[in-house]
Amino acid sequence: MGDSDDISQLLGRGEVPPVHEHNASGGSPFLLTCDHYGRLIPRVLGDLGVSESELTRHIAWDIGIAGVAETLSKLLDAHLVAQRYSRLVIDCNRPPHVTSSIPVLSEATTIPGNEGLSREARAARRAQIFEPYHRRIDEVIDRRIAAGQPTVLVSLHSFTPVYAGIARPWHVGTLYHRDQKLPPLLLKSFGAEADLVAGDNEPYAVSDETDYTIPVHGEARGLMNSGIEIRQDLIGESSGQQQWAERLARIFGEIETALRAERMI
Ligand SMILES: [Zn+2]
């Protein structure tokens, strides 16, 4: 597929950059990230050999989370840093050395355009999509620390209601590993919502091998942090995205008050 020039020019003239930001001067202590915000594919990669119906499924992106993230960013006055290209091109929440970084199989779907990639082709995806996104998050955290602005990292995701034939009962999950401050506050708040089934590290837990944003930008930098996962059938439409953004804005507002009262931010 293409010559070496094509590989080095993964993103062509006129294609949008990977990093999308909203409310960059927001005053909230919460810094929102969204690794699986978009499902764009660089033109040079075609459709990766995957059908359009597969490219709109959860394997390509986190369905519904973009709308939640934008509205939550607005309601909280929080900076959002998001990534526009499909996780099938390169997964921005995987360490680049793991197999699932550029998956050849996602759930039960093979990704022909990811098979047998050269070292150069892998490096181009990393250099032109993965690294600009994570470099930007780094810069934002550096800038906030230098300015004395408190920073609590919240990584926004959504999960498919049924995975490999198994239905998932949770509406929302708190995902974490080493932070013992923010996740308990989130679990307490979710537990107080009478209509919610909340997952405690469900549908999956954060680990150094299966995640990147929380270990690298949250834990390694000593920031309070958590992932939030919302079930995709609840946010497939804009009304659900709005409702979930409003609910999360209320909950994060209460958590901000609690953190300030305890002088943790
Ligand atoms: Zn995700």
Image (cartoon, rainbow, N blue to C red):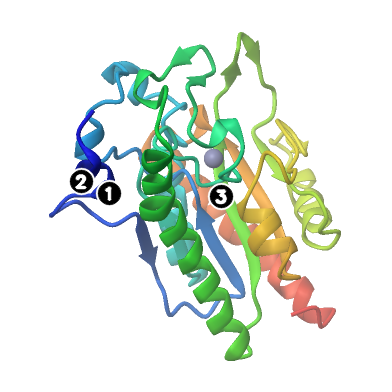
Q: Residue at x 21, y 42 (%)?
A: 6
Can you see residue 79?
A: yes
Question: From mark 1 to mark 3, how far is it between C-alphas?
Answer: 30 Å
| Residue sitting at the far bottom | 147
Q: Residue at x 48, y 72 (%)?
A: 77
Which corner quadrant of the figure contains ligand 1?
top right
The residue carrying mark 2 is 5
Q: Is residue 251 left or right of residue 44?
A: right
Mark 1: which secondary structure?
Answer: helix
Can you see residue 71?
A: no
Amino acid type of the residue tagged 1 in the rendering:
Ser
The residue carrying mark 1 is 8
The residue carrying mark 3 is 156
- Percent of width and height locating residue 111: 40, 20
Which quadrant of the rendered structure holds the N terminus?
A: top left
Amino acid type of the residue tagged 2 in the rendering:
Asp
Which quadrant of the rendered structure holds the C terminus?
A: bottom right
Question: From mark 2 to mark 3, how far is it between C-alphas?
Answer: 35 Å
Task: Compare residues 12 and 205 and report the one nearer the observer.
Answer: 12
Q: Assess whether mark 1 and mark 2 are in contact (beta carbons under 8 angstroms).
A: yes
Q: Is residue 181 left or right of residue 34?
A: right
Q: Assess whether mark 3 and mark 2 are in contact (beta carbons under 8 angstroms).
A: no
Which corner quadrant of the image does residue 202 belong to? top right
Badge 2 or badge 3: first in the primary sequence: 2
